[in-house]
Amino acid sequence: MSPPLTRESLVVHGHRLSYLRSGSGPALVLLHGIANSCQTWAGVIDRLAESHTVIAPDLMGHGESDKPRGDYSIAAHANGLRDLMTVLDIEQATLVGHSLGGGIALQFAYQFPERCERLALVGSGGLGPEMSAGLRAATLPGAELVLGALTGVSGPLRLGFGALDRIGQVTGLQRMRDLAEAGDALLALKDVEARRAFLRTLRGVADAHGQAVSALDRLYLADAVPMLVVWGSRDPIVPARHAETVRELVPSARVEVFDGAGHWPHLDQPGRFCDVLLDFLATTEPAQHDLDSWRRLLAQDRHGVVPSAG
């Protein structure tokens, strides 16, 4: 029998933050991608919660969380995650981040290394400039009007995207399922507040040339934290070669590319995703943050040479 899954909420800094909670044990925080919600993890939460306390928030500006006119930068999302963990009395956690959520997880580990036990990145942002043409187009002036027009005909669009999802499930064509999932994300922007939060979030990390925020120059710090990278080989949003970039820069990282999966490998292959993640959790020790070691890491130049004290 699966542990009970509850939808909860709390108010931080005057804004309501909604999240799913299930299970008990070491904390596992699941961070969704842009324009998605915590529901993207629905297919894996039950199994993960058999051995962990699973917290899956709707990021601010997404899902059932508030969508204030405010700061939607990666750093602000990381700060919000710290505050959520603090209120929930979670001192440390393993972070699992998909797409935008991966970029937030990386930022969190950089800002608050003492609170991050492990990192699991799923089709993550922040690991290279390349991204889909559709997201790049959404950073351009006038995108607000286009999004408003598209979401204004949500009924026919919902039927069409639902059909694509069913075709993808029957045929196994992950591209169809990716289009359906992207369509659901688009339909989630029917409210002006949601569209405003989406565009502010996107424009904070990307422009017409692609991803503008990169963790690559700080990725060497990941040697201090156990890291798992999961990607779909047919990811149409963020290319799978970014996983190979991590493999080259962080030799200690475990990299798993799911053949045939798209941008949502935890939806395409939930059983394998849980197998890989749970094995990673069982076979790695949580990071033990040490200020002196962290200082030495930060002092290294690009070639790993530590400057002498004199």
Image: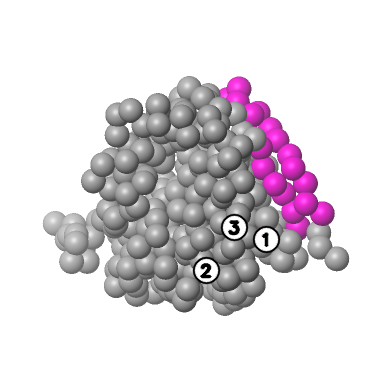
Q: Earlier in the sequence, mark 3 or mark 2?
A: 3
Question: Viewed as shown, does residue 182 lie left or right of 214?
Answer: right
The residue where tag 1 is placed is 43
Give the alpha-carbon distance from disc 3 to disc 1, as whole Å: 15 Å
Quadrant for residue 188, please give it.
top right
Mark before the other along the chain sequence, 2 or 1: 1
Q: Position of residue 153 (x, y in %)?
A: 54, 33
Horizontal relation, residue 133 to residue 309: left or right:
right
Write down the quadrant of residue 140 in the picture. Answer: top left
Secondary structure mostly taken by the magenta-highlighted segment of the chain: strand
- Going by the image, does 275 lie left or right of 182? right
The residue at which mark 2 appears reads as: 173
Q: Please indicate, yes or no, whether residue 71 appears anywhere in the rendered image.
A: no
Q: Are marks 3 and 2 in contact (CB under 8 Å)?
A: no
Mark 3, residue position: 165
Name the residue at 53% across, 29% down. 152
Residue extending farthest to the left is 310
Q: Please name the colour scheme applied to the rendered image.
A: one colour
| The magenta segment | 4-28
First along the sequence among labels 3 and 1: 1
Q: Per the image, is 8 magenta?
A: yes
